Structure formats: C-alpha cells, structure tokens
Image: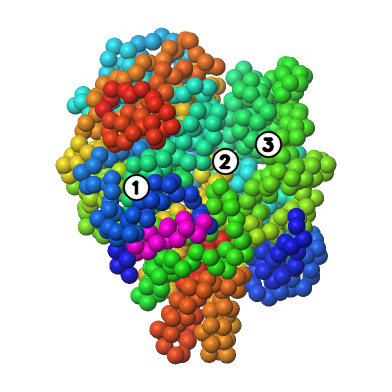
Amino acid sequence: MSEEQTLRTRRQFLRTGVLGGAMAWTLPAFIEKTFFALDAAAAESAVQVATGKDSPILVILQMAGGNDGLNMVVPYADDAYYRARPRIGIAAGNVLKVDDHVGLHPKLKTLRGFYDEGRLGVIQGVGYPNPNRSHFRSTDIWQTATDSNKFANKGWLANYFDACCKGEDPVVGVSIGAETPLSFSGSSGAGITLTRPDQFRFISNDPAAGEAFADMTSNSDNTGGSVQSLSGDVAQGDGNTLDFVRRTALDARISSDRILEITRKSKAPVTYPGSRLATDLNLVARLIAGGLPTRVYYVSQGGYDTHSGQSGTHERLLGELDSALGAFVADLRAQGNLDRVTIMTFSEFGRRVAENASGGTDHGAAAPMFVLGGKVKAGLHGTQPSLTELGDGDLIYTVDFRRVYATMLDKWLQAPSEAVLGRKFPSLGFV
Amino acid sequence: MPATNPGDAWTPLLAAHLVSRAGFGGSPDDIASLHSLGRKAAVEHLLAGDEDADMFPPPELTPVADAYWAFRQANMMAEGEEKREALGDLRRAQLDQLRAVRAWWLQRMRYTRYPLREKMTLFWHGHFATSFDKINSASMMYQQNETLRNHALGNFKSLTKDISRDPAMMKYLDLNRSEARRPNENFARELMELFTLGEGVRYTEVDVREAARALTGYKMTPASGMFRYQSKAADLTEKTFLGQTGTWNGDDVIDIICKQPECAAFISRKIWVYLAGTEPGPDLHARLTRKLQDANYEIKPLLREILLSPEFYSPEVVRHQVKGPIQWLVQISQSLEAPLPPPDSCEFILRSMGQVLFAPPNVKGWAGGRSWINGSTYLLRCNLAGTIVGADDKPLQKSRDAIPVEWDRIAPAEMRKNPGALCDSLAFRFLSVPLEPGDRQKVIAFLAKRGPDISDATVRDCAHLIMSTPEFQLT
C-alpha cells in the first residue's frame, strides 16, 4: 500500500470515526470541517498544512527530576548562596561568570561559549504561583500549562498541534524516548513517539505478512466489530481504548517508512558523545536534516533528583548536557539549519536553597531555563529571585513559565499563544 | 447494575477475563477448567492459591553483609585502575545476581499455582516502587520482593510499616540518611503522595515536614543490611501531624494516615484500576473504600469484592485494558503453552518495551494503561512477538532463538483444512473473542496466499499477524 493510499485511509478513518460517533478522541469542529473539505477535494497538497520545510523548529529538552537551578546558574556574588550551601556551593573561582552576579556551572563550558557567541539566553527565576513540590504534579503543570490548582488531560503542545497544524501528518510532533510526554497527549491525531528508527517498522520474513499487517492496521472497515460491539456505545470523555490503540497503530504505520528512509540516508557531520541524550539529539538532527515536516521535537534527560550526594551527580549530568548540546548545535550549523532551530530546557522545579544533611537538596520551586539557537537573543532575561526572601525556603518565581511558552508560540512558531494557552501571557524578549 | 448486564452469564470469555486480570492468562484448557468451576468458586480458587512454599527456590545471592565487606575492601584500595576494576567486578556481580532474581520472578509468574499473589506482588512493586539503580544490591531487592509477596494479599497497614523498615526502600528514598537535626523529606513526602493518600490529599507541606521529623532514627546496620532503630538520631519531640499533636514516631504517622478515609479511598481505587483498567464509578468506589476500611485494611476482602462485582464483568471493563509488557510477555507464553523466552531475551524484550523488574522509571512506578502504547512501542510489540514465535530470521537482537511451540498441537491437521476455523481458534487463544470481520478476511486471504498446505510456518506467521493487531494489545 503506497503512502498516499495510507494517508487517504487515515483520513477516511478519522472521518468515519467522527460520523460514527464512537470516537476515541473528539475532533474540534474546525478540524472536522477540514477533513470533510480534504475528503471532498481529495487535496493531497493540503497534507502538510502548517509544516513547511523552512518553518521554525522548537526542540524541548526536559531535565527530569528537578534540576538544581542555583548550581546551574550560580549567584556567586551573593553571600546568602554560600551561607545556605556550605558543602555543595560552587566556589566563585570555579564559576564561569557571565556578569557581576551570576555565572554558569564549571561543566557548562560549551554553553558558556554559546553565550559569548550570542546564541544562549538564560531566563532567570522561572516558575509559577503556588508551586507544587511533587515531581509528578509539577511536571504535569509544566506539560499542560495550567494553573497549579487546575487539572488537564491535554498537553500544551497537543493544543498547539490541534490549533495550528491542521494537517493530518502525525509527525508534526516527534518525541524521542520510550514514553509519550503529557505535553503531547490528547491531540486529535498529531505527535508520534519513537525510540530506535531501525525498529520503527513491521518486520517479518514474509512480505505478504507485511502487506497483511499494513491492511489490517489501516482498515477503515474496523470501526465496529466484535470487541467494540461488546462495549456497545461507551460514551466516555476519553473514548475507548481500542480506538486509541488503532489510531496509534495507524499513525505508526504512516510515519515509519519516511522516518526509516531519512535516518538511513542522513549521517551526522560531527561526532556525538555516547550519552543517551546525545544519541537522541543526534536522531533529532538526522530528522531535521532529512526535512521531516516536524515543528516540535522533544527529548529528555533524567536523574536530576539529587536528594543526597548531589555534587558529583549534578556535575556529571550537566557535563552530559553540555557536550550533547555542543554536538547538536555544531551539527545544525554544519547542516545550515541552526537558524531554524531553538532549543528550550525546562525542569519541573528547582531545588531548595539550603542544602540538606545528606549533601543534597530537597524539592524547591523557581529555576532558570536555557534557550539556545541561531535566532535567540542571548544574555540574561528576567530577574534572579532573592536568596533571602523565600517562600517556604524556596525561591519565589519572577517569570511565569507560560510567558516563556507564549513567547515561543507567538514569536518563534508564529502561532497564536492565546488560542493554545487559553489566555494571554506577556511576551519576553529572548526571541 | 441492570439485570441485562452481559456479565451476568458466566461464559468462557469471562473466565478468560478473570484469569488474565487476576493472573497472567492461561491456555484454552486452563480457561475451560476455571469456567467449569462457576464464577464464585473460580474467584475463591484464585484467592486461596495452593502453592507449596518451596516450589520456587530463590537463586543463590551474596548475602548483604558479604557484599558490604567486599565493597568496603575495594573502596579502601588506593585510587587507580585496580580499584576501578575491583569495584566494577563487584557491581557486575550484583547485576548478574539481579538478573537471576528477575528470571526467577518471571518463571514464578509463569508457572505459579497462585497467580493472584504474583499479580498483586507486581502491583505492590509498582506501588512501593524501588529501583536497583540506587540500591546496587540484588539481595536487598530480593528481600523487598519477599516482603511484598508475604503481604501481597495481607494487610496494607502492616505492609506499609514493613516497607518503611525495608532496607532497599530506606536507601531508595534516603530514609536512612534522615536525622533529627536535618530530616530528609523524601520518604515522608512519597509516603503520603504516592503510597497512601494521593498528591495533595488531606496533607500540607507542613505535614510533610512534621512526618519527616517523626520518620527519623530509621537506620541500617551496614554490615548486615538489617533495619535498626537509632533513638539518638530520632526526633522524639512533639509533632503536629494531620491535626493531631503528640510525640509521634514513624508507625504513629502510618496509623494516623490509615485512619483517614482518603487513604482507603486511594488504595481501593488504585487496586481497582490495576485489575479492571478503568476508573471506578462513585458508587462502586464508595463500596470498595468501605470494604477496605471495615476490614481494617485487609486486602483479600477487597479483592473478593472486586472480583465478584458485576462491574468487573461489565462491557466497559472486559477486553479494554492495555497489557503491560510483563502481562504481554507472560500471557504470550501461557497462550502458546510454551516456556518463556530465555532470561536474556526476556530482559531485552521487557527493557525495550519499558517494564524492567526492579527498575521502575521512578518512585511513582509504571504509569501503565495507555502510556504503554505509542507508535514506537506498538511496532516494537509486533516485532518482538515475531521474534518470540520465530517469524523473523533477523531478530531484533542477535542469537535470539524463538521459543519452542508445538504448532501441531495448537493447530492440528484437521483444523488446517479449514482456514476459517483455524483463524477463529487462534483468535480465541490470543484474544478470547473473534477477530474483526475485516481482519478475519485478511488473515484468511493471507493463508490462501501461502498455498493450499498450511505448514507450521504458516500457522506461526498467522499467529504473528493476530499478535500484531490492536486488539491483541488489550486484555
């Protein structure tokens, strides 16, 4: 089955679902209309609506576990920093200073170079009101961009995909890793997750089995059948699990051939370090080089939950981050794509200002974010929070993280942030 | 529930449902014999179990004390290549032993005569999630596993208290490093957020800090790896926790938490979701919560209530749960009436699919449900199924042998004369329900393409196709 046919099947599948009313996911009305229009006109050219090959790209890098922002961007000129952290504070002499007050962790040498080149922006004091100190809840808040007392099942990037990328190409969002981040979840059909591209296809000795598999996963007749008839019309907000699995199977089938093709052809022009993060960023660079119409890539680095013996662990993690980003930026530069890409880091929270008895730090609140790319306005943005006026022992945020998202949407992705985030947040000046 | 519920009739499908949720599935014969018992007796059979204590002798493990002294000796060596090698050898030895524990547990899940206990042990492992990555001791992980198994259908309060004294947990959440002068909040926070009440339910940040003060003095004797209460590290002063003031210790904190109805609600919901795969409605949830409270946190009465409830057999529940990787793997082996793949294959399969025993992604355990399925893991599941049955010559990893399946038993010669019957028989074996009509046609067309004589290889590839359907990912 050709790719064109598959895309058509997918459209039929979505449409049948809408009309059948037994949908796993609810399509917003305008998308529904789009599908009717597409179907009527059979307009194959409309497949890549907002996903042109010259469009800006956002790469989101999650530092999971709660990164200690104070030891990443160190307020070395503030005595309160050293008073609070007699054991794990970073000596002023070792800090890679960027101005008279703050500097970067000594392991961030490459990033410091990007700062000097005018490619790295540091947004200080990012957080949100009434901070939550649970990893999971706070991660959810960042991923859904809600107020800390509101719950949502749909991610902020899923909102972006649905509002601004009305095509039906699921690769508009690509997350690298085993798990789909919540920020991608709940979209009406965009966003895929993959780990190893060479395995992102159906494998069998017999090509006939591959064809049968393609037919079965693209089967638009399968909208009501034995399993579903058992369940009758289950009108649940989240839809039925079988529909969800079917849609996922179909999306994977559609995307797999192209991704495989691209990654087979493209080779990295630079050497990447061996870390998981570097491997994942290398894959992102391959997909960018191959012209996949993706607007948002998502990668993740874990291990930042440093409750005890923090110094060595944190140093290793930041070293990995620095070398991985170094290779990635060099790669994009060699491709000539650096100006199309902005990288944004985030973590669910920073850590407590005072160290604990185990040479570590407990969960905290506000922390800095990095933005990096060809078009970033380098330098320090926002205000460093006070180290003495604290909220429950933690830094009080000066910049709401949704202002960072809004800026990325409005100024970088050229998307209406209000429609995505549900209200207007003032922009920042980093793009 | 209305009387028209299709779950009222006790069918082979529902027996298959029960054995796959309260265990890891079974062969068509297993399902038939459970079906013949009738629903009530089948549930009692699963609740009772009949396993001999010595049926699964554990692998040989270096005792914690010996490992401790060996590490200590290596650590005292002068810095350099030799020391690095010595430490590396010790770590590798621990990892090898952990792999043996994993293989042992998987075998136990596969062959146990008390599947519900293993299923619940797996639940508690995800609930009181602890990862070897921070523990580096196979013995400690095994010890925790035995604690979870001993209490798996026992009492939640006792289990939680034992877990607070469990060396692996103490190490994982830094409880052994928490001292009166500077309490470490890690365990206290997760105790409420993940283990008993749910995020932000009933407690405040102040309660976290007060509980952390109460949960001090929990130490471990390094040489034996045994729990030891050290009163001089404990904060014995007054605390106000969840509105109650006293000189509370760690057990008091757990008792106070368990008095909150929110705790019974949290645990009963989580067990329901684990077994049923859906959210309980408000009436059902209230019923289950009351059951757990009335039984003073005994788990077995709650399980009986769940497994006999009409809701458990409702169309919203049956065939609507995504199989976790372990369920997927053990159930394949059950359905094919074949052994599990060799231990290193199981290790590879479960690692690629994202569920490695003794290595949950974080303290919240595995998210489960739909999070198991995305484009990547979907295709991976298809391909791993192909590797397991041998439908792929160039498997995902070298030297992966297919498991030995008696295809002539699964599809006898007589059945092979009728492709429709063959297709239906395989569908029941793998799905408990018929294939979608469209899929059925395609499988039959595939059989036709392979020629008039249906060989073992054709049956195998046909099984692979059915195992690659969206339906197969559900149970």
Tell me how far mark 1 sits from mark 3, CA to CA: 43 Å
Query: Mark 1, mark 2: which one is toward the viewer?
Result: 1
| Residue type, mark 2 in image | Lys
B283 vs B189, left or right, is right
Asked if residue A18 lies in the magenta stretch, the reply is yes
Q: Chain of mark 2?
A: B
* Tag shown at residue B364: 2
Dot 3: chain letter: B
Visible residue check, residue B85: no
- Relative placement, left or right, of B76 versus B289 is left
Residue B389 lies, in percent from the top left, at 49, 72
**Quadrant into which the C terminus of chain A falls:** top left
Q: Pointer 1 and pointer 2: residues touching (CB < 8 Å)? A: no
**Relative to B177, is B90 on the left or the right?**
left
Image spot of residue A272 (x, y percent): 26, 44
Q: Amino acid at mark 1?
A: Lys
B185 or A365: nearer the viewer: A365
Estimate the spatial distance between the alpha carbons at disc 3 and disc 2, rounded to whole Å.
12 Å
The residue that mark 3 highlights is B196
Please tell me whether mark 2 sits on a helix, a strand or a loop: loop
Label 1 crowd bin: few (<14), some (14–19), many (20+), radius 10 Å: many
Residue in view at x 32 percent, y 23 percent? A428
Could you tell me which residue is drawn at 56 percent across and 83 percent down?
B421
Please tell me whether residue A111 is drawn above or below residue A163 in the rendered image. Answer: above
Residue B82 horizontal/vertical position (percent): 40, 42
Mark 3 secondary-structure assignment: helix
Q: What is the span of residues highlighted in magenta in the rendered image?
A: A6-21
Question: Dot 2: within a 10 Å radius of its alpha carbon, few (fewer than 14), some, or many (20 or more) residues?
Answer: some
For residue A219, say whether it is visible.
yes
Residue where numbered disc 1 is placed: A166
Q: Is residue A259 above or below residue A78?
A: below
Quarter of the image with the N terminus of chain A in it? bottom left
